[in-house]
């Protein structure tokens, strides 16, 4: 199951893609890891999906990552006496703490934290931005607003606050229960919603205690101003363009996507581009030309992964959506300009031994036109460091740790193999060649470059580069 592209594909599971046969087909079509959205998935179903993915993983002998996406706080209006009202441009509309059903002049906002944090001039976006209000008079009991963009408003529609820094945790009681269930089941990544600050990620990590890696979803304007700190606290980043496009002007999202992709790469953290990538394929067997260009742009930017949401979870053509994304990735990466575009965005190596080794290994591999760059890695950090360099040859990561292998499923260009740890350096070199030979990366007589940490088996000690020749049986020697 060697992929012919470097960018990874993250497919969301749902009603259209929850049985063994379909998950197998999605993997064969190109999905490298799977997302389980806890907004729509009870614990029993989540456990069933994880077991099914592990079944597929076992049958193919290749690590498959599982990402559980926590719902995060859902801020909603209360109910209306008539079920719905029509708000007119310019009218006054009050949000308050009164539980009485609302009318065309007021409605309950059952979130005292919002009323406490709102200030005059702050915007409130209702129902995914369809209706926009501006706060004019605020207190802990009410907020008098002016309707800037009117429309129909009904019970319990969502509320977004692009200007307001809310003093609430990114995790609700539901999220905490979902998180514990996911960790007990043994998932690999936790996607954290509603991140506003690095402390939100740190709070989640204290609960997780290393049992999974944390991916911060950037969907709030407040996170943009604190992006460097959030990236530092996180293990990976997701550019959640849907919610980001509700709370920010749509025209800002493309540039922010580029900035976040480059900042994450500079920090050596995987970055996933998400939301509406092939949206029309929920209903149609082929995407629009604009959607193809959107996916291609993410590939050219050097993102680690691209994500399908409803396209694979609830759409009519889940396999076709994954297959289409797979073909786009392959075609872009065959473009003669692709590697030069990605290389032009390459950050300078950090002043650490591991980053210096990764940079040197890339330069050697490209200078000698080697067919593969092989990483022996215990924790996966060596492979992540090498992937940051976006080398021309494929990266083959060999690890004795299945957990590390599954987490690497989201990392650009990494083909991961779980194998028994090397006994010594000679065994490491020999088996690196035989594994790359077996999986079709090298031929007999070719040379490979091997990156590892010595002593073997100790995480975070990337300090060695070897060039080895592959023998007629696939084993390598120095």
Image (cartoon, grey):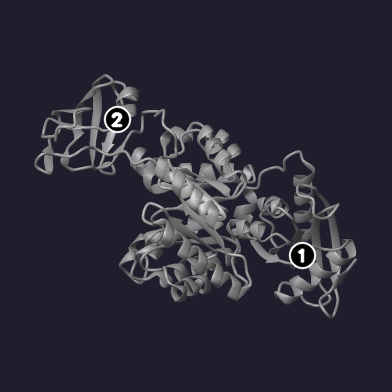
Location of residue 362 (image quadrant): bottom right
Element class at badge 1: loop
Disc 1 and disc 2: Cα gap in Å?
55 Å
**In which quarter of the view is residue 472 placed?**
bottom right
Q: Position of residue 21 (x, y in %)?
A: 45, 76
Report crowding for label 1: few under 14, some 14 to 19, many 20 or more residues within 10 A (C-alpha). few
User: In front: 377, or 445?
Assistant: 377
The answer to whether marks 1 and 2 mark residues whose Cβ atoms lie closer than 8 Å is no
Q: Is residue 254 visible?
A: no
In terms of sequence position, does the residue under pointer 1 or pointer 2 come before the other? 2
Q: Residue at x 66, y 44 (%)?
A: 347
Foreground: disc 1 or disc 2:
2
What residue is rendered at 24% in x and 32% in y?
109
Q: Which residue is mark 1?
A: 369
Element at label 2: strand
Single out the residue that lies furthest toward the left.
82
Residue receiving disc 2: 123
- Give the quadrant of the N terminus: bottom right
Q: Position of residue 268 (x, y in %)?
A: 64, 46
Q: Residue at x 36, y 28 (%)?
A: 164
| In-front residue for pair 48/266 | 48
Left or right of 67 on screen, residue 74: left
The answer to whether 130 appears left or right of 395 in the picture is left
Q: Quadrant of the C terminus?
A: bottom right
């Amino acid at each position: 199951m060697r992929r012919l592209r470097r960018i990874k594909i993250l497919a969301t599971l749902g009603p259209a893609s929850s049985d063994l046969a379909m998950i197998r087909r999605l993997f064969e079509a190109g999905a490298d890891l799977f997302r389980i959205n806890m907004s729509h998935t009870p614990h029993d179903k989540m456990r069933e999906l994880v077991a099914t993915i592990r079944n597929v993983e076992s049958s193919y002998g290749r690590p498959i990552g599982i990402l559980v996406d926590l719902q995060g706080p859902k801020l909603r209006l209360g109910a209306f006496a008539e079920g719905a009202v029509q708000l007119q441009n310019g009218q006054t509309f009050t949000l308050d703490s009164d539980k009485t059903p609302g009318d065309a002049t007021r409605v309950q906002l059952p979130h005292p934290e919002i009323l406490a944090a709102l200030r005059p001039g702050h915007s409130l976006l209702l129902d995914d931005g369809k209706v926009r209000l501006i706060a004019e008079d605020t207190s802990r009991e009410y907020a008098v607003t002016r309707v800037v963009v009117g429309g129909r408003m009904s019970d319990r529609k969502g509320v977004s606050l692009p200007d307001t820094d809310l003093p609430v945790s990114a995790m609700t009681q539901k999220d905490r229960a979902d998180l514990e269930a996911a960790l007990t089941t043994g998932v690999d990544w936790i996607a954290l919603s509603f991140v506003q600050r690095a402390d939100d990620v740190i709070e989640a990590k204290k609960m997780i205690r290393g049992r999974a890696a944390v991916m911060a979803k950037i969907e709030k304007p407040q996170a943009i101003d604190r992006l460097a700190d959030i990236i530092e606290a996180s293990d990976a980043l997701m550019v959640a363009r849907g919610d980001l496009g509700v709370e920010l002007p749509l025209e800002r999202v493309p540039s922010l996507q580029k900035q976040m992709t480059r900042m994450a790469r500079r920090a050596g953290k995987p970055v996933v581009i998400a939301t509406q990538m092939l949206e029309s394929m929920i209903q149609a067997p082929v995407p629009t030309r604009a959607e193809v260009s959107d996916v291609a742009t993410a590939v050219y930017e050097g993102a680690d992964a691209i994500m399908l949401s409803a396209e694979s979870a609830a759409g009519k053509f889940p396999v076709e959506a994954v297959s289409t994304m797979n073909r786009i990735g392959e075609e872009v990466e065959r473009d003669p300009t692709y590697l030069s575009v990605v290389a032009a965005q390459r950050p300078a190596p950090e002043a650490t031994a591991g980053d210096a080794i990764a940079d040197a290994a890339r330069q050697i591999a490209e200078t000698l036109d080697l067919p593969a760059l092989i990483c022996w890695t215990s924790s996966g950090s060596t492979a992540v460091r090498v992937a940051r360099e976006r080398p021309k040859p494929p990266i083959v990561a060999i690890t004795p740790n299945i957990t590390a292998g599954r987490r690497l499923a989201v990392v650009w260009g990494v083909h991961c193999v779980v194998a028994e740890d090397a006994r010594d350096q000679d065994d490491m070199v020999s088996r690196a060649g035989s594994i790359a030979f077996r999986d079709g990366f090298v031929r007999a007589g070719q040379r490979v470059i091997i990156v590892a940490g010595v002593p073997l088996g100790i995480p975070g000690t990337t300090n060695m580069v070897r060039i080895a020749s592959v023998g007629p049986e696939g084993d390598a020697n120095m």
